[in-house]
Amino acid sequence: MSAARLPLRIALVGFGHVGRRFAELLGGPYARVLRAAGVEPSVTAIATANHGFAIAANGLPLRRCITLARRGRSLAALHQGEPVSGVAELIRSAPADVLLELTPLDPLRGEPACSHVRAALRCGLHVVTANKGPVAFRLRLLLALARRQGRLFLHEGAVMDGAPVFNLVERCLPGVRVLGFRGTLNSTTTHILSRMEHGVAPEQALREAQAAGIAEADASNDLAGWDAAVKGCALANAWMSADIQPKEVNRRGIEGLTVQEVRDAARSGKRIRLVTRADGFGRRARVSVGPERLALGDPLAGGAADAVLMLRTDLMGEIGILEHGGSLDQTAYALLADLVTVARHAVSSAGNPRGR
């Protein structure tokens, strides 16, 4: 290891599609990016729901971890030290500087992700998450805790995968107030509706989305609009000083739509898409989710698994962000982008980010 590089020890909570893809890329291009930022990355702990726990102070063999998880086998054989009984104990005992929280979405409570983030911050870890739950349910509290602890809570991957959504407003639009937004934020439903336009049954289209790894672990969260509602809350809470919970969103999903309805709309020059909208500011902010008929020229009327977000602002007018064909690689990249921010913070602090 170069003497100029600081160690960046990473603990993963959740080792599903996104976690495994991140681990794959960390062995190649991601490591090069982080080294260029001044740190030497290693994964020292992994917690899974179905494959056990593993901690290794000198770094876990990631290829072996990926192979074991894909074969449905436990990671426990790679664990060093005293046995770990659960995620809370792993967070307390892992020799780590940053936690990657990658558990599935719970759209009703945001748990256990919120508790994982809170516990990690209290233990002195930075936290990076691709889980939108903590941003939708506990953003203000978690940011305040992170400030008190002198740590970072980063969540670029919570909405639109690796597209720089939160960073765009925070870093690139100083002084701008977001007055509202509308977007197609759920790639699964966009894919399903696009395929239904061509006569494909929604069940088949959903299987395609699941095979591509873009569907939620519980696909009913996509179809019923819960995923889009949570993302809408996350954006409104981050940008519009709102404090909206997903259960407060006026929400309709796409379950009742038929192939005939979708094809009839297409023949009339319209496309049906699941649209998330937000307006207002602070306590007056409101979020809604529901299928809408959009003109073909509307930026939100794209096909495939495109995600589009249009922001309405006071000083910059309307700004659009397009992510074409969301994938695991784009979600994994969001984790890398946030880890680069952690790395720069560590280097600027001239020491180990956790002080161990």
Image (cartoon, grey):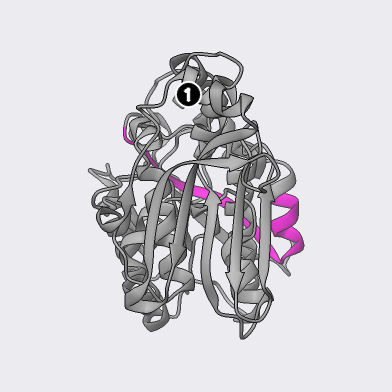
Q: Is residue 137 left or right of residue 75?
A: left
Q: Is residue 41 magenta?
A: yes
Q: Is residue 183 at all visible to an observer of this figure?
A: yes
Q: Residues within 10 Å of mark 1 (few under 14, many from 20)?
A: some
Residue visible at 35% across and 71% down in the picture: 142
From which residue to which does the magenta span run? 31-49
**Image quadrant of residue 346?**
bottom right
Residue farthest bottom in this picture: 175
Q: Secondary structure at mark 1?
A: helix
- Give the amino acid at mark 1: Glu
From this view, report whether residue 102 is shown above or below residue 141.
above
In percent of width and height, residue 171 lies at 65, 75
Residue for badge 1:
261
Residue visible at 33% across and 56% down in the picture: 91
Residue farthest front in this picture: 268
In percent of width and height, residue 81 lies at 34, 45
From this view, report whether residue 149 is shown above or below residue 229.
below
Q: Nearer the viewer, residue 188 or 73?
A: 188
Q: Is residue 13 at all visible to an observer of this figure?
A: no
**Image quadrant of residue 240?**
bottom left
Q: Is residue 171 magenta?
A: no
Residue visible at 34% across and 36% down in the picture: 224
